[in-house]
Amino acid sequence: MTALVPVDQIERMAVSVARSGLFGVKTPDQAMALMLIAQAEGLHPAIAARDYHVINGRPALRADAMLARFQAAGGKVEWGEYTDTRVVGKFSHPSGGSVEIAWTVKMAQDAGLTRNPTWKSYPRQMLRSRCISEGIRTVFPGVVVGTYTPEEVQDMDPAPTVRQAPTPAAPELSPQTVEVVIDADALLEQIELASTLEGLELLRADIRRMPKGDARNRVIAAATRRVEQIRAEQEPPAGDPQIVQVEEGAV
């Protein structure tokens, strides 16, 4: 059991997390709520910033973090078929027995989930996240305590990453005055949801189109941090393309 962190310290951490613009947390209240949940689970409050995200106002627990908690609690998973069209996992736990969960692209299409463009780019990862969430909820729901994966939350209410400014009403203004505005908050969410270096590379064009300033700096810092997290989580296979470093000089 991690030692309890005083509430005043949690409040200061929550303010710092909210100001960073990372993890999808937009207000200190959101950050503090997640940190209090983490402390109630016997974890250090800062773990909330690593494992949780707030997307469209909903708390989301990373699929990898969900699976890690399940395995730490004595659960096991055996992966069977693992392709871009079908993923099968057998989940077991001493308290809940075992179950085999299968998710296919057709199931996702029938459920209306594939509107999210991430399904087209990373179908296998999205199917895997669905298997993890359903399998763990079935055999040992105490691990997830009512939270969903970021992939599930995105399917509930996808958020656009780019919005177009309204066309000026004045007839004398030319069409060139219409600007494409990059939504920094939505882009930060996409960066945190990226599970591969290729996924981050797809966002580089939007980052380059952002005007210089605090918002762009926050996005660059988030992308650089996510690159480091992905490289730390799994060693890329031989021949894996290298993402261009997201730094001021590179974008």
Image (cartoon, rainbow, N blue to C red):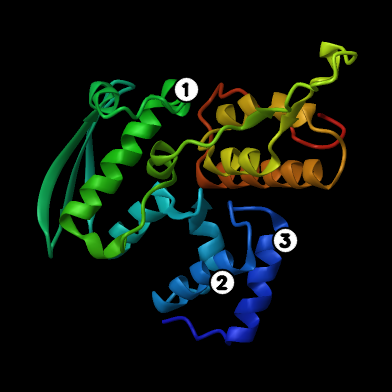
Instruction: Nearest to the eye among marks 2 and 1: give it.
Output: 2
Please, what is the three-letter code of the amino acid marked with disc 1? Ser
Q: Is mark 3 on a helix, strand or loop?
A: helix
Q: Which mark is residue 121?
A: 1
Q: Is mark 2 on a helix, strand or loop?
A: helix
Q: Going from the N terminus, do you reach mark 1 or mark 3 first? A: 3
State the residue at coordinates (72%, 61%): 19
In-front residue for pair 136/150: 150
Distance CA(mark 2)–CA(mark 1): 33 Å
Q: Position of residue 38 (x, y in %)?
A: 46, 71
Q: State the residue position of label 3.
A: 19
Q: How crowded is mark 3: few (under 14 residues within 10 Å), some or many (20 or more)?
A: some
Q: Which mark is residue 32?
A: 2
Q: Going from the N terminus, do you reach mark 3 or mark 2 first? A: 3
Task: Locate the N terminus and report the quarter of the image it occupies.
Answer: bottom left
Q: How crowded is mark 1: few (under 14 residues within 10 Å), some or many (20 or more)?
A: some
**Residue 110 appears left or right of 44:** left
**Dividing the picture into quarters, in which one does residue 248 lie?**
top right
**Residue 168 appears left or right of 86:** right
Q: What element carries label 1?
A: helix
Query: Which residue sits furthest left?
Result: 97
Q: Where is residue 175 in the image (x, y as percent from the top left)?
A: 82, 12
Would residue 74 be seen by someone viewing this image from the given angle? no
